[in-house]
Amino acid sequence: MTPEPNPARHDRDSVARSALALLDEVGLADLSMRRIAARLDVQPSALYWHFASKQELLADLADRITASLPRGTTGVLATARGLRDALFAHRDGAELVLSTYALQLGSAHALDALIAALRSDGADDPETRATAILHFVLGHATLVQQRMHADSHGALPPSDEIDVTAGLDRAFDLGVRALAGEVSAPRAPRRARA
Amino acid sequence: MTPEPNPARHDRDSVARSALALLDEVGLADLSMRRIAARLDVQPSALYWHFASKQELLADLADRITASLPRGTTGVLATARGLRDALFAHRDGAELVLSTYALQLGSAHALDALIAALRSDGADDPETRATAILHFVLGHATLVQQRMHADSHGALPPSDEIDVTAGLDRAFDLGVRALAGEVSAPRAPRRARA
DNA sequence: ACCTGAACACCGTTCAAGT
DNA sequence: ACCTGAACACCGTTCAAGT
């Protein structure tokens, strides 16, 4: 019968899930602690029981975004595409992971997956190549995702190209294949001796 | 004799120069309109006479950072290194250019330089390769620069590698060369017919 | 042409206190 | 264990008004 004065008590996971949902709605620039708190019907200060800072919350979100990476011997190109699509799966996902990654709080996962894929593809110097591919995918995805968002809001001068996305997809595949060492290049000559 | 009540009147250029200097001192996160204004001994609202928004000011800074690119037939690797070093020349330069580039307000300059270099190197599909290299350099530089800053402030757990920078430099060179199509590999035979 | 002053609608974070 | 309430030190931006 009591009108439940405090029906919503939360934990770390529910806060993070709510924040991730809000990210998809409003984007990274408008993802404030106060907005997250409002969505949970809670005072802003309540969030600091679950996370020490906004940065720590964002790092948790970045981990959740990259955690959905398939862990298997799927090959480098598929692994890189999986990473890119995981970043695309949430609004501003690429930018969020990029700005969090350098702080080493997460995404070593993505690097490991790339190294494993390169090993199974038989590439030389897998660590160096994995690092290069990771940097490439994060840069590419961040730029493309920002452009997509700008396009959809008419904030950009109309391009004279009919489909920019197709060109960007080609750049992505070419990039990953080149960085992987071209071991699985399409219709390339058998192999030119160095 | 008058004690000069308003000695400092500014224009677009002086505001941008002051903002760029402040960026080097405090970093992108602390580069606020109010701080820039204080540095110019001016009210925050005065900045809006020269720039319509903070975003427009940041885009101007990004342009200044990439404007120092050497414009010549220097080859892809040298051009890419020049871009990277231009980004490194200012605190958070890579992040600033990365977040501004997608808005198309600048940095077409960098893309043009890369295309020209690729052409003079005789690479095939220079536009696609230039796009891939630009994405790679921006992603790489952003990550490395954030890591450098985190390292220097002890915000990162100490790495077990002796010199991480050396590995990152190798990843950069390998990345650019691979994306360029390996046409100018070091100590390669004179030229292998395609 | 360039700036002030005041206001508006926000931020992240801390901390004593409540339940 | 989890939250409130109040405060602190900030934000970007607008706009009438000054010189």
Image (cartoon, coloured by chain):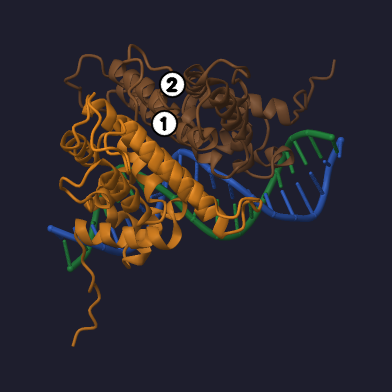
Chain colours: A brown, B orange, C blue, D green
Q: In which image quadrant can residue A32 be found?
A: top right
- Label 2 – label 1 distance at C-alpha: 27 Å
Is B175 situated above or below B41? above
Q: Which of the two residues, B134 or A97, is positioned nearer the viewer here?
A: B134
Looking at the image, residue B108 sits to the left or right of residue A92; the answer is left
Q: Give x and y (percent) for residue B80.
A: 30, 44
Report which residue position mark 2 lands on.
Answer: A183
Q: Earlier in the sequence, mark 2 or mark 1?
A: 1
Position above or below: B167 against A177:
below
Going 22% across and 26% down the picture, which residue do you hit? B193
Read off the chain for label 1.
A
Image quadrant holding the C terminus of chain A, namely top left
Going by the image, does B42 lie left or right of C17? left
Name the front one of labels 2 and 1: 2
Are marks 2 and 1 in one subunit? Answer: yes
Residue B139 coordinates in the image, percent (x, y): 42, 38
> Which residue: 45% across, 41% down?
B171
Q: Name the residue furthest top.
A: A187
Is the N terminus of chain A in the top left, top right, bottom left or bottom right quadrant?
top right
Badge 1 marks a residue whose secondary structure is helix
Relative to A58, say whether B30 is above or below: below
Q: How many marks?
A: 2
Q: Which chain is mark 2 on?
A: A
Q: Using a 10 Å C-alpha cutoff, classify the residue at mark 1 as few (fewer than 14 neighbours), some (14 to 19) or many (20 or more).
A: many
Identify the residue under disc 1: A142
Residue B119 percent location from the top left of the image? 17, 34
